[in-house]
Amino acid sequence: MSSLASLSPHLFEAAAQAARSSCKAVLERSAPHPALHPVLHPALWRAQGGAPAGATVLPTGFAALDAELPGGGWPVRTLTELLLAQPGVGEIRLLAPLLAGLASAGRSVLLFAPPAELNAVALAEIGWAPAQCVVVQAVPAMNGRRVPGRKPPGAELCWAIEQALRSGQAGAVLAWPGAALRPEALRRLQLAAQSHEGPAFLLRAAAAGAQPSPAPLRLRLQPAGPDELTLHIVKRRGPAMAEPLTLGLLPVLSERARLRAQALQAEAAPAGHAHGAHSSRSSPL
């Protein structure tokens, strides 16, 4: 048997060239083809790129927030969770530009179990046509007791939300599912949202942020002062948010009421109760 040392220079060079060609062919076969990148499944996304290619989003009405959201706006065909310190911190005004745009296009907005009655005059002032709102309330238990053979109110509410999402008929869905939302129900809602050609929001208590969720976008909202909101994206497709974002909301207080709220906030701040003092006086919007 011949050794490498006994090979002629010409044969050695031919063998080396054949080895290089073989290695190049293996590497080319193992490398991802560039043409495959644009046809990734819609549920797949790249960590450094944010939203999946071709994802549909709707502008929020806040340029600073659009710059932070994957794709540049509120996503459709998926759940978005808003985690609230308490109801009335400004969540409706945060969504007002989006919902007003949908209402002006003749699309209805379904609200499931809102924690307070809607004020039609206030909604009209922020550009949201009350005629386009459909409110669905959970049926309370009779005398605090369950009716035999009937699902718990939370389960019935989740079923109604799921059906609304699967129907694809609503422009947007807003739901306050309460603390009894079970993980399996949350997964079902995320699957149902994939059939919904619009945004879908779950408004939950801030404590729910410590629990896992299939929703790809989760935002924590806190009041920052009269007509201001601090927002932190706790989960999104892409890199983590560096620092919270403060947004100015459409004012709903009169000048006199605004000055009074600012004075009360300043008085409570030294005692360390600024957040609670302001939150207790927050507008229902």
Image (cartoon, helix red, strand yellow):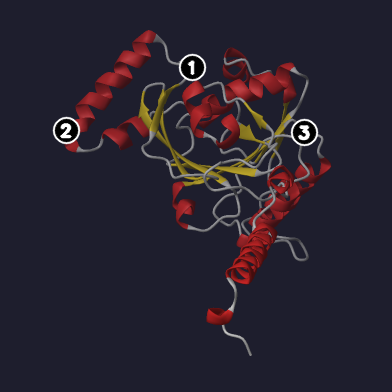
Q: Position of residue 211 (x, y in %)?
A: 49, 58
Q: Which residue is mark 2?
A: 270
Q: CA distance from mark 2 to mark 1?
A: 28 Å
Amino acid type of the residue tagged 1 in the rendering: Leu
Q: Which mark sits nearer the N-terminus, 3 or 1?
A: 3
Density class for disc 3 (Cα within 10 Å; few <14, some 14-19, many ≥20) is many
Q: Is residue 93 visible?
A: yes
Q: Which residue position is annotated with label 1?
A: 250
Q: Position of residue 149 (x, y in %)?
A: 78, 65
Among the two numbered marks 3 and 2 on one chain, the one whose residue lies closer to the N terminus? 3
In the structure shown, which secondary structural element does the residue marked by tag 3 occupy?
loop
* Residue nearest the viewer, comparing 203 with 11: 11
Q: Which mark is residue 239?
A: none
Element marked by disc 2: helix
Q: Is residue 271 above or below residue 141?
A: above
How far across and how far down the image is residue 23, in percent?
Answer: 63, 65
Residue 46, compared with residue 108, is above or below; it is: below
Comparing 227 with 40, the one in front is: 40
Q: Amino acid at mark 3?
A: Ala
